[in-house]
Amino acid sequence: MDMNTVHRHIAVLKIIHHEESYRILLKFMLTVVLFIGSAAAIYFACEFFVNGVEWLGRKLGVGETATGTILAAFGTALPESAVTFVAVVFGRDTAQKDIGVGAALGGPMVLSTISYAVVGFAMLWNHRRLGRATQLIECDSKRLRADQAWFLSIFVVKVALGLIVFAYKPWLGMLFLMAYVVYLLRELRGAQVLGDEVLEPLKLHSKGDPGLLWPLLQTTLALAAIAIASRVFVSQLESIGIWAGLSPQLVALLLSPVATELPETMNALIWVRQGKERLALANISGAMMIQATIPTALGLFFTSWAFSRELVVSGFVTMAAVAILLLLFSKQAVNARALVPLAGLYAIFVAIIVLM
């Protein structure tokens, strides 16, 4: 082979290398664009969702707290519950099923740390604009404390089951479903009907009384948009995580829950901006209860529900966050500044996982 042929081969290899690098760069840029675009889509869909769910609660005669803990929470918990369902039911191997278990543990951790911290930060940012003299959060502390205590009692059992092995463990999934039904009935019994508070006009029917059909239609369409955008967001986040060298299990535990809990976090931002932090906190509290029960039941039904070290750390970080929330909600008033440091617990979790 003469030198000219060698040079031609080298030139061809360089062209192929540059083309491959170009394709990788384009793929990465597309991932970033979809990542940002889907996050924006989730936010705007949540604007329609919170507006629709408030009217839906009013038309169904559901109390303000129950509107957040049941209607809003059930809707926004669908993306993360779907992630767990698909992974544990249709996963082809143990690794894929472990992704569902990681999502079931990661969701409550993100809600109890990042989402509550976002409420605190949003109130610190907006309290002057809302005309508040202090940074106190308006909420039903007693009820929120009861919710957190109820969650913690269920979550402790959830973590304990991941540490032991026995034959009839799958049957205990029914107990978690029953626990959510009991919580649901308790919320409905304790609900107070919304009074004559003026709601913002329904976005899809801004003139006159929208009735029941229009709020239901707007809420359903918004949920569909949130589900689609959340799926795109999770996919792009998983791609970014894999490019960063993270295993699928770590992506499921570290990144996917942050993405799937984005609707609750967006709702919190919107409601706090409107001065309705009571609804924001109720939405997060209700979503935590769903995450403590329904995904757990699915995991128990379809997996061995055996925890790795990372999952155990996740469970203890969540319990630490809830213990702090119990302490904060034991007071009549909660300062927004006290919620912000909860995000530090998630940072501690990430540091522990990286160092393990």
Image (cartoon, rainbow, N blue to C red):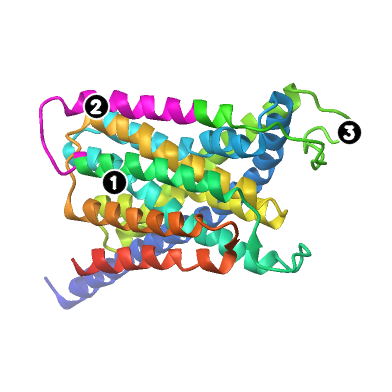
Which residue is identified by label 3?
A: 207
The image position of residue 248, as x and y in percent, is 26, 50
Q: Looking at this view, is 20 or 334 the one in front? A: 334
Residue at the (51%, 29%) spot, across then down: 186
Residue 275 vertical placement versus 174 (above, below): below
* Magenta span includes 223: no
Q: In this rendering, which labeled residue sits more in front, label 3 or label 2?
A: 2
Asked if marks 3 and 2 touch (Cβ < 8 Å), the reply is no
**Snapshot quadrant of residue 246:** bottom left
**Snapshot quadrant of residue 297:** top left
The image position of residue 217, as x and y in percent, is 69, 27
Amino acid type shown at disc 3 = Lys
Image quarter of the C terminus: bottom left
- Is residue 80 in sight in this rendering? no
Amino acid type shown at disc 1 = Gly
Which residue is identified by label 2?
A: 172
Q: Looking at the image, which residue sits at the far bottom?
A: 3
Structural distance between the alpha carbons of marks 2 and 1:
19 Å
Which residue is identified by label 1?
A: 102
Asked if marks 3 and 1 touch (Cβ < 8 Å), the reply is no
203 relative to 217 in the view: left or right: right
Q: Looking at this view, is 276 or 328 the one in front? A: 328
Which region shows up in magenta? 161-184
Residue at the (15%, 44%) spot, across then down: 163
